[in-house]
Image (spheres, rainbow, N blue to C red):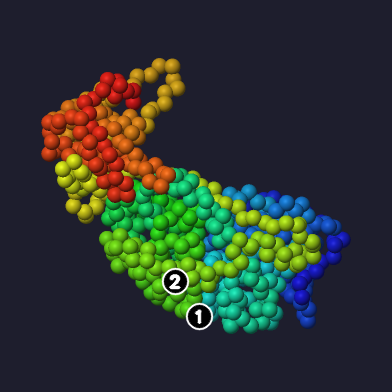
Amino acid sequence: MPYEAPDDAPEPLLRSTPSRSLETGRLDNLSGSGQRAAGSGQRAAGSGQRAAGSGQRAVLVAVRSAGALHRLLDVLPAFTGDRRITTRFTLAPGSDFDIDALAALERADVRTLLWDEALRVKHDLILAASPKGALRLLPGPRVLLPHGAGFNKTVTNDGSTSIPSGLDPYYLMAEGEPLADLHALAHEEQVNRLARHSPATACRSAVIGDPTLDRILVSVPHRAQYRAALGTGPRRLVVLASTWGPESLLSRRPELPADLSRTLPHDSFQVALVLHPNVYSSTGRFDLARWLDPALEAGLVLSRPYEEWATLMVAADAVVTDHGSTALYAAALGHPIINAYDGGVELIPDSPMARLLAATPRLPTPADLPDVLRTALTVDIRSHATAAFAERGQALTLLRQHLYRLLRLRPPSGPLEARAFSPSSTTPRQPRTFTVRAEVSGESISVARFPVLTQEPVHHLAAEYPSAGPRAVQSAAVLWSPTGKQSFHRPHATVWTAAGWTAHVMEEAPRCRTAVAVLTRRRCLIRHRTAGLLSMHLEPHQQAGTVSYADPGAVASAVHAWLGGHPKPALPVSLLCDTGPVTVRVGLAPATSDDLDYEL
């Protein structure tokens, strides 16, 4: 039976502490204070005091890792607007990934309890996303939610062999009785598997849906905003999703992010990486950034572990995944899924994730991605998500009913709506140097740009002056200026004109054949060593009510390749430039005074 505490118990001393101070004690020092009373379904009161005064309810959120905290933060809006509810957070000891949990608690700006204090206080409700560790010592009714999108993998050396993490009866039972008063699950399939592995606990389960999926679904109208924040434009966004552990994508294929970034044309594809929060915790952001630096330098988007991963799922055009369950959210959106899991013992057979991977094409090498993507576009994978998520759009409303039943309170009236994710604040690096492949056919040019270390056949080197660095500047055939007019707020300033800047660049870099001053995304001034000064006008690509602009640097490389065969062109001339995702019309004409005198 659910834990019941008297309404007139005195309120304890609750204090807000820096999260780093939560890490106290060891499990062997915590014995006795949270034991279940013999012969009773209630938790023993011990000597602690109740965590809330009369008419109030205290909810404790017990976290073991940053990933668990992120999951629970998506649940807490079930209490929105209710002043009767007070929430406190505590860090349950025993996890290898609790370091990032401390930092995540600080970023969330929550009120916290020391673990030892949490053991002394009786709680009206305890929320957790993992049954492991010392959760059983906390006095109060407990609610368990899945750690992710279901139960699809087993964790080696942690629990019973071949049993999905989260469904192990070793953790779900406490002294012969179910640990949790409620298992809030996303689908009936999860209830059935809970009954199979831990029959005594299944009667305490309820299907409420997935609060995180509901947030993703209401975020779909923001897709264009998410892509704009990433600078994706008309490119295809390919998201790599890696779980944690020895069988993860990043462990098995650590070079894949960099290899894809070097192999895929920059103007056709953008590559992003979503990592399980445990990877950040075990590796550290500094080493991750150092290991991934070649890919980051080539433009890889590395999401932060909280919320940004979900915006990438919404913004994605395709997802390359291992056996981590994150890809089920992409499947729910209907995105093409590509299988990059190399097999092992962690994936649970016949789980939703196993069935999804069995239905999707595999990625043998990075160079195969365009062909594999075309195959993935023909595979309908929505049914696999349907088998993992039920009650879409209803999770918070349904969960609220169960939580308030355990709290013995009447819930606020009216439905609850999930909150959309904010756009990513991560700004990917923009490559400053490209090797360029160009093919000219009459007045049509196709151009593809790659990072410097690519193995693809190329035509010339192009770089941004001066940020590409002295070696690239002295080696490049094409140099372009930073995009956009500089802002000068000081009373005294000296600025380059477009004509002056291009002349200066040509003098400083004798190997440069084409200097390009980017005036606007539609206008450039080109100085070519043979053709002289030219005005370049770019017409945007219009389709289905949208306008897409090609990168002026890519178009400049296309014009450079065309001028190689037309050193004294008859002007004006209209060219057709194919950059990959868009084809734009480019007009070349003698330079105008407005373009020559344009202040950069």
Q: 10 Å neighbourhood of mark 2: few (<14), some, or many (≥20)?
A: many
Q: Which residue is mark 2?
A: 356
Q: Is residue 505 visible?
A: no
Q: Quadrant of the C terminus?
A: top left
**Which three-letter amino acid code belongs to the residue tagged 1?**
Thr
Q: 10 Å neighbourhood of mark 1: few (<14), some, or many (≥20)?
A: some
Find the residue positioned furthest to the top: 492
Element type where label 1 sits in the image: loop
Residue contact at pointers 1 and 2, CB within 8 angstroms = no
Residue that appears at 58% across and 49% down? 107
Residue that appears at 52% across and 54% down? 220
Q: Is residue 124 above or below residue 504?
A: below
Camera-side residue of 104 and 546: 546
Horizontal and vertical percent position of residue 452: 25, 48
**Which three-letter amino acid code belongs to the residue tagged 2?**
Leu
Q: Quadrant of residue 408?
A: bottom right
Horizontal and vertical percent position of residue 584: 29, 41
Q: Quadrant of the N terminus?
A: bottom right
Element type where label 2 sits in the image: helix
Q: Is residue 244 above or below residue 569?
A: below
Q: Which mark is residue 413?
A: none
Residue that appears at 32% across and 64% down? 372
Q: Which mark is residue 161?
A: 1
Camera-side residue of 339 and 3: 339
Q: Is residue 173 above or below residue 532?
A: below
Q: Is residue 86 visible?
A: yes
